[in-house]
Amino acid sequence: MTFDNGTIIPCYDSDGGLNYSVYGDVQITAPHSYGDFEDYCQSNKYVIEQYCSGAQRGTRKITCPHNTFCQMGACIQNSTCGNNVCEQGENGTTCPADCAPPNPPATICGNGVCEIGETADTCPKDCPQQPGVIPFCGNGVCEQGENARCPADCPPQSCKDSDGGVNLVQLGNVTAINSSGSFIFTDSCIGNSSVLENYCLGSAPMTTILNCSSMNYCGDGACVPIPVTNSTNASQNTSIVVEYPANEIVVVDFDFENGNGTTPAGWTTGAWNPSQANFKWENSTGNSGHRSLGINLSTANDASWTYRINLDSQRSYRLAGYIRGESIVNTNGRTVGENLNANTWYLTSDSIGTFGWKQVSIIFTGQTQTAISCRLGFFSNTVTGRGWCDDLVLTSDPMSSYSSTHLTFFVDPSDTTLITDANLKQWMLNLDKVYEKYTDLVGGTPFGGQKIGIMSVRNYPGGWAVAGNPIQWYEPYVGDELGKVNTGEWSFGIMHEIGHDFDLNNGIWNFDAEFWANTKMYYPVETLNATVTMSGIRYTGSQLKTYYETDAGASYDKTLSKGNFSGDALTYKFIQIKDQIGWDPFKKTFRYFLTLNQSQIPTTRMDKFNLFLDKLTEYSGYDVRNLFSTTEMNAITAKYNSTTA
């Protein structure tokens, strides 16, 4: 934000911070994450509060305190109509006994109410021609043509909002009932930037007009992110679509206060030893209300309440909530106790012993049939004691996304400070070319041709990055690597993981996955003249051959030439084969393997290796074994005969 004196601050919060009693908005001017983000009500119980954390925007879901409710992005005091005080939340329409009606009343054409000042000519949507009847809201008479939208004249009996309140990011319907019948009011757009938002105030249906933030537009009755499209190479008809992060979107939340029976709707129980686990939907131990999920283990066990939900496998999500423990002991001598758990291996930090309600959270990658759990124990971690959880909220984790023809990159904006937008977009176009080279080499595409996601993840995925869809890239390494990309790098590591994804036909032909990821990658590096850095040395195109021959820690000169196997040394030998016979026999060999089923593939790694050499020889007319010395072949045989694939 820029002040009149010229001062620029990267993050400005109009209500001064985590101030749930005042509506505010956060303005961001930091690179790659600019925008205007408003406080809003997730329901009448929760406010989604925007705030600044240094130069970054934060989002927090806050439960409104006792005797308050959320309205217009703030927690306000409950009002009492009829006490002769016009309190916050009351007005001349909702409580004419306490508040004088406006003179003249403010009108909103399109809200379904023929208000004083509107006519059939000025607002035919609200004031249809009705012979002999001119209904006006606020004159104290429930007239023909008025409906549940005018509670002052036609007292309402009930009101229900499908999107939970003033919720600008979701299309909602308000269903209201009064003595005249049932009425439905649907959120709608006013122009491209404003929402006609319907919500309930008690049993009364209400309407307000709110503006979308600067990074959103109104579409289908809700504020949605604006996609920014930039064409960087019109001659190739390629483009990068950039979506900057909006607010964290609440996917589902559980306060466990409502429902019937012994379990909340959709939740199931399970345990390592089911007969020794005691589950209870408690009614007097809640964090913000009365109810919570409880587990009591008198003998060593691992037990959980679980809820399943379909999530996008190319997005990350945050599960947050409150846990409480009493006399929790890990019988394996470890520190895993009460925790929130998602997709099996993601769990919150250790919590044993006795402790009061505390908030915990995890970030994880979504998948079909994602399981989220309130858990007491874990695999190989049996525990005793009691645990509770409450007020769970599942949100989509806000990330910027860069989408090209074949890939989508999800990244936290804070990790893009060392790279310009232009260079990041160019890198995505470069990776598109890499993808197409892999397709040309092996004769097909992975995942049915769907885009491959590259996702920055905060939970350790098992390595610097791990192949799959999405490719999971460990967040502590992302920023520095993008800094290298900013200088012209193509990223050896990410190209390597994309290469793993091109192990087609379930990789049944593959006798050494890591060797093949590097060897296949040499094709796009050489043919695209790509630049990568390994061990501090920069290589462009065919220069990478030198890395495998002499520079790598386990290069050919240091290992295979002396009778010791290494994958990097074998990559050098296959580059030698390519230099002798060209790439075409490799392409034909990969396509041959795509025609085989599991029963036609050799079972040992050595037999697969020999079959690959046989096909290269057949398709090239040159016996490629002539390029291996006896010493080299003995080392390879010892390696690949040692295990079966």
Image: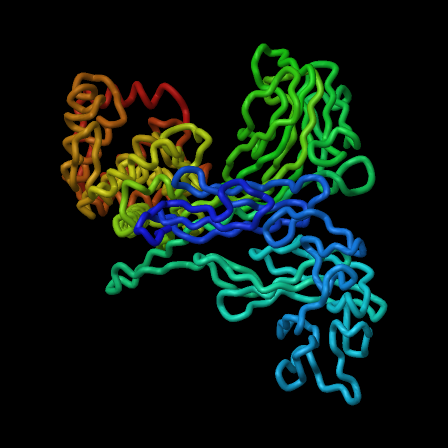
- Name the quadrant of the C terminus: top left
Is 569 situated left or right of 315 in this image?
left
Residue at x 37% of width, y 31% of height: 476
Q: Position of residue 188 (x, y in %)?
A: 59, 67
Q: Is residue 447 above or below residue 116?
A: above
Q: Position of residue 178 (x, y in %)?
A: 82, 66
- Quarter of the image for residue 497 reads top left
**In the rendered image, is residue 185 in sight?**
yes
Q: Position of residue 486 (x, y in %)?
A: 24, 43
- Quarter of the image for residue 226 reads bottom left
In front: 3, or 23? 3
In front: 36, or 420? 36
Is 558 situated left or right of 640 in this image?
left
Residue at x 76% of width, y 86% of height: 130
Seen as rendered, the residue at the extreme front is 84
- Quarter of the image for residue 61 reads top right
The image's colour scheme reads rainbow
Residue at x 54% of width, y 38% of height: 318
In front: 82, or 356? 82
Seen as rendered, the residue at the extreme right is 179
Q: Position of residue 343 (x, y in %)?
A: 56, 34
Residue at x 69% of width, y 81% of height: 127
Q: Is residue 436 above or below residue 415?
A: below
Is 284 situated left or right of 395 in this image?
right
**In the rendered image, is residue 445 in sight?**
no
State how many labels appear.
0
Q: Is residue 482 above or below residue 173?
A: above
